[in-house]
Image (tube, grey):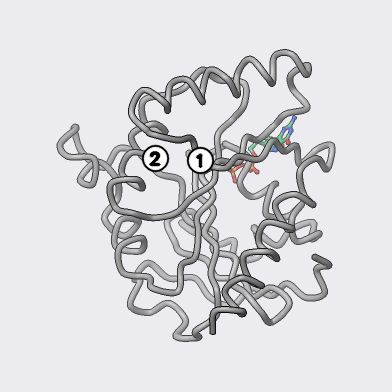
Amino acid sequence: MIIKTAEFLMSNSDVDKCPKNQIPEYAFIGRSNVGKSSLINMITNHKNLAKTSGRPGKTQLINHFLINKEWFLVDLPGYGYARVSKTAKQKFQSFITDYFEKRQQLISAFVLIDIRHTPQPIDLEFMEYMGVSGIPFSIIFTKADKLKPMAIERNVNAYTEELLKTWEETPNYFVTSSSKNIGRDAVLEFIAATNTEIESMR
Ligand code: GDP
């Protein structure tokens, strides 16, 4: 997919105020500092798109970007534990869970994981929440430039093995580096193929 246009549309904290357009939507989410802004800027080929909504507190907002006037890229705030653990759902900020449960335009999410770390409980719990809620997602491993190929493989396998303890199959995943421009085409091709599939079902 060639990115012709990428425009910031709006930020808000209420899923009911998100754009009403019936176009496919893809959401990016992960813990803060995982490399989400850098990834969005790489994917859209803009130096500062993910920051253009930048106001204090923007990280607590749902940010909509219109790409090629065809699909929405949604930059969601970093998740963190909202309260001391209860059910998986109650662990995350309510406007995040509201977004996933109510946003019918959402086609798929990308859960970002820093490839350097061993599987972390909060990320595993977030994926469990997504699975239990029936929300399709892929994993995007970030910062792959920080590791050698063998370490990348080892860490991806560690994640896969951890997920297979509770999942029947592992989600689709991408290995990326925004510094080295790795993985951009694969993510964009996945979105393009999914959009084509949706179009053919209409
Ligand atoms: P966000 O908080 O998830 O939006 O993360 P940012 O995109 O702001 O990145 C957090 C930090 O990680 C910044 O210091 C980035 O420069 C760094 N970073 C992001 N992506 C990469 C990457 O692909 N490789 C490396 N080496 N550093 C990265």
Residue identifier under label 2: 127
The mark that comes first in sequence, 2 or 1, is 2
Q: How far is the residue under mark 2 from the one under mark 1?
A: 10 Å
Q: Amino acid at mark 1?
A: Pro
Residue identifier under label 1: 171
Q: Nearer the viewer, mark 2 or mark 1?
A: 1
Q: Is residue 46 left or right of residue 142?
A: right
Seen in the picture, residue 83 relative to 67 is either above or below; the reply is above
Task: Give residue 127's position: percent from left, percent from top.
Answer: 39, 40
Residue visible at 64% across and 73% down? 8
Q: Nearer the viewer, residue 190 or 200?
A: 200
Q: Nearer the viewer, residue 12 or 125?
A: 125
Seen in the picture, residue 35 relative to 76 is either above or below; the reply is above
Task: Give residue 31's position: percent from left, percent from top.
Answer: 48, 39
Q: Amino acid at mark 2?
A: Met
Residue visible at 74% across and 13% down? 150
Mark 2 lies on a secondary structure that is helix
The disc at residue 77 is: none
Residue visible at 51% across and 24% down? 159
Give the quadrant of ligand 1: top right
